[in-house]
Image (cartoon, rainbow, N blue to C red):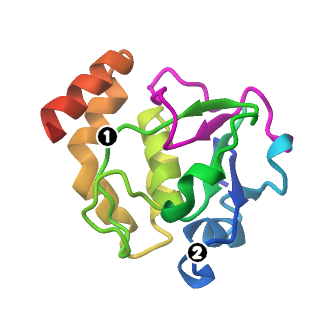
Amino acid sequence: MWLNIRIYVYEMHQDDPKKCTSAKMRRMKLAHPLYRLNHINPKMVILDPTSNSILTPKDDLTQGLVVIDCSWQRIEEAFPRKTKGKRVRLPLLVAANPINYGQIGRLSSLEAAAAALYITSNKEQAENLLKIYKWGPTFLTLNKELLDAYSKASGEEEILEVERKTFG
């Protein structure tokens, strides 16, 4: 199997299960379920859109990448501050999923995991992950230049500069 980085999903069951990208990732054995947040290893990277830290190419995903699947309307309650692990937000990207298409930063769990993989030089795994939906490869098309710029950045400052130039 081509999986290099283990992806873990904590599902809060706040969205329509038929449209839940993390559930499909789990069903296809592309992600592993997390049943409790206290099972997160302190060395794992947690994608947290409320974090002040930004994912950089230097972040180490070898202990695992955690995606917390929740509704965007209830985002604040989804990320309790006591959770172990390195909490980072993704750099700004444009959503390709049908629900939030074209919106900045409103990524599905699938898009978020793929972006994290791509930025940290796991591009093949990211591309393969996105193939489970017809719209998945569109995410790469919409964000190719940004993802490449983010993956070449030396740190948060350069990523913030790319965000400023692109999104104002």
Horizontal side of residue 31 vs 152, given as left or right: right
Write the residue at 69% across / 45% down.
Answer: 6
Q: Which mark, residue 15?
A: 2
Task: State the quadrant of the C terminus.
Answer: top left
The magenta segment is 39-61
The reply to whether residue 56 is visible in this rendering is yes
How many numbered marks appear? 2
Horizontal side of residue 160 vs 12, given as left or right: left
Write the residue at 32% across / 42% down.
Answer: 92
- Nearest to the eye among marks 2 and 1: give it: 2
Cα–Cα gap, marks 2 and 1: 27 Å
Please state which of residues 18 and 135 is positioned toward the viewer in this rendering: 18
Write the residue at 22% across / 23% down.
Answer: 161
Q: Magenta-highlighted stretch: main secondary structure? A: loop
Task: State the quadrant of the N terminus.
Answer: bottom right
Q: Position of residue 124 (x, y in %)?
A: 47, 47
- When the figure is inspected, residue 136 is found, relative to residue 54, above or below; the finding is below
Write the residue at 43% across / 39% down.
Answer: 90
Instruction: Please check the rendered image and state whether residue 143 is part of the magenta-colored stretch, yes or no.
Output: no
Residue at the spot of label 1: 147
Which amino acid lies under the numbered mark 2 shown in the image of this protein?
Answer: Asp
Rendering quarter of residue 60: top right
- When the figure is inspected, residue 130 is found, relative to residue 92, above or below; the finding is below
Q: Label 1 neighbourhood size at 10 Å, few (<14), some (14-19), many (20+)?
A: many
